[in-house]
Image: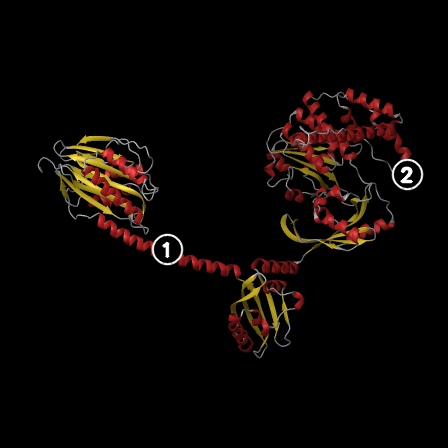
Amino acid sequence: MTSEPVTPAQPGAAPDLAELAKVAARQRAELDRLRDQAATASVVERAKGAVMALTGCTADAAGELLLQRAKAARHTLLEECWITLGTLAPTPPAAGRASASSDAEARAPGTVALEQSDAPDDVTAALARLGQALVRVMTPHDLARCLLEHLGPDMGADAILIYARRPDGGLGLIGHAGVDDQLAAQWCQVPPLSGMAALDALRADEPRWLEDFASDERRYLLIGDPPDRWRSRAWLPVPAAGPAEVCIGVLRGRAGVFTPRDRAHLRGVTKLCAGRLRAFDIPPERDADAATDAVQALFEALPVAAMLLTPLHGATGETEDFRVEAATAQVGDLLGRAGEEPAGRRLLELRPALAAEPLWQGCLQVLATGRAYEGQPFAHEEFVAGVAELYVYTARVAPLGDALVVSWIRHGSSDRQEQRLADLQRLGNLGWANWNLATQEASWSTQVFSLVGRDPADGPVRLPEVPELALPEDTPALTRAIAELVHAGRAFDVPFRIRTSGGVRHLRLVAEAVADRHGTPVEVHGFVQDMTARRRAELALVESERAILTQHDVLQAERTLASRLQHALLPMSNRPVHLAGLRVEVAYLPAQSGVHVGGDWFSAIELPDGDALLVVGDVAGHGVDAVATMAQLRFTAKGMVITGSSLTGALARLNTLLLHSRDSHASATMVLARYEPRRRRLVWAQAGHPPPLLLREGEARYLPRPRGMLLGATATPVYEETECRLDPGDRLILYTDGLVEHPPDSIDLGLERLAEAVAAPHGDGPASLGPLLARMLPDERRDDVCVVDVRVPGAQEG
């Protein structure tokens, strides 16, 4: 592998990070390629050695034989090596080894003719890819994951299970993928029962294709929770020179048959897996001496999960792994390898993630110091009779000569109660305290020392001395409570303050007495709780409430002032007024919710030339400022129109007035209308305000709005006038948005309701606005309402 230097683009400049990343990626890819190449060469050499041992040929001849066989079967050389390793006969025992050699040679790969593969080209290519991927597989679990990645896209496989035959004839789960740990734990051990498809396939040495769920469910006990999670399955024994010992299950969520192509593909997969399963790096077997047997027998008799580890050193002399010399049956489950035999294997092979866990550092620490190590308690889920149970364990490591003994202690209920009590004190920020009144002895939990800021080395404080911990102003109350408790047995709950290095702390002491058979208090027990955070929250709440009350008083005073100003500026008449031949009725209703008064207003006056000026407006906001702005606009608008300004000119000047007012953010909407009685002509303009509503001959419609922008919105507004002729009997409604806008309903819905209400039959008396307002307004109003009701008298009235 070569390295590529990265030179800066300019002298003194830093290397480009993107270029560094590219170089690192290329080096990683080259390293992976070299590792795969080395692993592939190892498989080839192992297969050549097997052929040499069984046929007696040279290394070159063995390699040539493998190449010929691969070419004849349309395999890659790597595939042929896997198949060769998978068909090796088991090594015979020392006695009778010579008599078995002829049988081994008869089954040797070099002496058996291979059939020409008739698999489709895509299957051949897929198997070649799998053969290459197998060189990176190191454990049965890795093999299951590799098969799922290979078969998932190809034939819809959703899960892979790999079972091995146990000495009692049952099955043990040695690898799985696509299956959650809970289900794997439930099916990690399969007893030798009939009705198991995997066992059936091993006994018959033939695949079992489960393609009809309804009939398969009647015939077999199906794995799954629920079983219909996988609608079709295949169980294939892995080829071996003797009886098949391993079975691979392919589970699919979809129903359907395994096509001839799928079956050929799966048979090829099992041939390759046979070699991979045999080629796993199995640790050398230990001598079966009496000492080894005694150690393993001892561990098998232990009632706890435990294992004996010996360190394995690398070239530098550092510990790079541990070998499991003996282990109890529970260890496999705690290491996440349920059903596997840990003894004789490397620890990191069983659990690679262990290198990043505290237990690994604990083992190295014990090797270095010779002192025992105990980890933190942790929760572990176990399945008892198919039901998940949560247990708490603590891992311990102790030295034993040059070896280590690792044990996992499961805490009983009393241990869990102590842990829960400690958690309760920590989470509740409290601690327990006991005082013996006869011996004057005291005992505190660790948390109490922390709460009162006392060094545990100084010991707890006697009960009569507890008031001395409090601030002087809190001492009398605490002294009285303790005296009543000691003499009369009266329990108490007393808050007090203490001064610590972190400032004043608010505490609470709750205590009660335990009396003897004569009723005399002999012991006091209770708890101390830190109430500082709660007390601060209470004080903050009191301050907030005080501020709210103060603000409420200010707002109420402001509302009263604004209301008085409003009434002074908008004198209301109890009856309709007659202006320029029109009958005008006005209604103003202040908001019912909140403490603010709004800025709605109206004007209805007769001009010097005999025309009538009709105005409604609405200032944004509430309170005194809104009322002041309303008064400014109301009187200015009347003055400008009286002195001869046009309606649009008046709106433009009012806009300028708002832009340069004390509150530069003030805005308002309004409608200005001028009525000429001689021609019954109504000219009007608007600034962002809803249009007037005209009722004529029982039909209500809104007048088309001329262009007009909100007052105070821009320095360059555009305003236009429009006109219409009013006929005898017409009714014109000018209003503010409080009449038609009632959230959450939209204003469009409010406009429709207003048109319907105005068109509805009603009396024409002086109080004709009453029914309209009753129909339009909700019980609780959040905004002011201003309405100007204009009527043109009919012919008979004129």
In the rendered structure, the answer to whether residue 792 lies left or right of residue 105 reads left
Along the viewing direction, whichever of 578 and 378 lies nearer the viewer: 578
Residue at 62%, 70% in the rendered image? 461
Q: Which residue is mark 1?
A: 551
Residue 746, percent across and down? 33, 39
Q: As drawn, is 783 to the left or to the right of 770? A: right
- The kind of secondary structure element at disc 1 is helix
| Residue closer to the observer: 255 or 740 | 740
Considering depth in this image, is 43 or 487 the residue closer to the camera? 487
Categorize mark 1 by other alpha carbons within 10 Å: few (<14), some (14-19), many (20+). few
Residue 95: give x, y in percent of width and height.
90, 38
Q: Position of residue 69 (x, y in %)?
A: 80, 22
Kind of residue sitting beneath label 2? Ala
Q: Which residue is mark 2?
A: 95
Q: Answer whether residue 726 is visible to the viewer in this image.
A: no
**Quadrant of the drawing holding the N terminus:** top right
The residue carrying pointer 2 sits among few (fewer than 14), some (14 to 19) or many (20 or more) residues within 10 Å by Cα, namely few
- Secondary structure type for disc 2: loop
Q: In this rendering, which labeled residue sits more in front, label 1 or label 2?
A: 1
- Mark before the other along the chain sequence, 1 or 2: 2
Q: Tell me if residue 429 comes above or below residue 9 in the rendering.
A: below
Residue 161, given in percent of the width and then of the height, sits at 68, 37
**Residue drawn at 65 percent across, 53 percent down:** 391
Q: Which mark is residue 241?
A: none
Q: Mark 1 and mark 2: span between their CA atoms?
A: 103 Å
Q: What is the quadrant of the C terminus in the image? A: top left
Q: Amino acid at mark 1?
A: Gln
Image quadrant where residue 370 sits: bottom right
